[in-house]
Amino acid sequence: MKYSGKLPKTNVNVTESSQVKEITTLLVGLFLIIFTVYYILGLGIDFAVEKLTPDQERSLSTKIGKELLGMPRDKEISSFLQKFVERIQNKCINLPFKVKVFAVKNKGVNAIALPGGTIMVFSGLLERVRSENELTFILGHELGHFKNRDHLRGMGRAILLMIISSMLLGGDGGVDGILNPFLVFSESNHSREQESQADANALDLAQCYYGHVGGATDFFEGMLKEEEPSVFGHFLASHPAYSQRIIDIKNLINKFAYKQKAVFKLDKNLKLS
């Protein structure tokens, strides 16, 4: 009798399903687990933030913001900004601490709220401010972050992202490179929501301080003429697009029927040497 070899009907060493399907299922499961962990720990951060005292915030600022606090400053402009923000704070916003403001020599168009009540305003931003009302809105935006304690929530989530990336995935892992953009997108979206709320707080503060909101969108309109990142870029940006911020602010102005009047010129040249 002639032998005719046949393959077995089943083979435990050979999978019947697609390897691509298995890898996809594994990655999706991994993403879901990590996002669940991130969400739960994020809620824990929000709870912890509410329990922090002003003294504990200042301690965090000293430890974490060393590099920023060590940036070169302009004493004269810092003094001007300090007096200005004190007038705004005393009249329009109740915070559990006195805010400190520093003008720092950096070409970045930015202002940063640090734990404990410190605002760092970059020279690149000050050089683009054309009116007192614009400056009020910018400072009001940062004061809004303090009111909502966004600076602490954002810092806590940033640390959480680093922990997830390094401890669960390993800094040099191939999957790390795939997952990090998704984690960044999640955190960026959270930050954009905070920025929009801070803009709303700044608008309310401007109304309180001047009795109108003239100039509320001037800074963003000026920036819009200079540069506007691509639509895709804004998905991974911590701030909403300038055009969207202008639309949102104007919608709020219409919603609350705020008046818009002439703006005040700055009584000081806000340019750092």
Image (spheres, grey):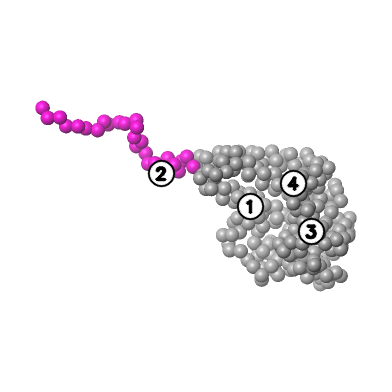
Closer to the chain start, of discs 4 and 2, is 2
Q: Which residues are magenta?
A: 1-27
The extreme left residue here reads 1
**Disc 2 to disc 1, how far (Cα)?**
30 Å
Residue 81 visible in the shown view: no
Mark positioned earlier in the residue sequence (2 or 1): 2
Q: Position of residue 259 (x, y in %)?
A: 79, 67
Instruction: Give the class, few, some or many, for how many residues have Cα within 10 Å of label 1's Cα (few <14, many ≥20).
Output: many
* Mark toward the start of the polypeptide (2 vs 3): 2
* Measured Cα–Cα span from mark 1 to mark 3: 29 Å
Residue at the image point whose x is 73% and y is 67% from the top: 219
Q: Amino acid at mark 4?
A: Ile
Q: Amino acid at mark 2?
A: Val
Question: In which image quadrant can residue 130 be found?
Answer: bottom right
Decide: few, some or many residues near mark 4? Use Cα within 10 Å; few <14, some 14-19, many ≥20.
some
At label 1, the amino acid type is Ser
Distance between the alpha carbons at the discs numbered 4 and 3:
17 Å
Label 1 – label 4 distance at C-alpha: 20 Å
Q: Residue at 63% x, 56% y: name it.
A: 237
Q: Identify the secondary structure beneath mark 3.
A: loop
Residue 188 marker: 1
Marking on residue 223: none
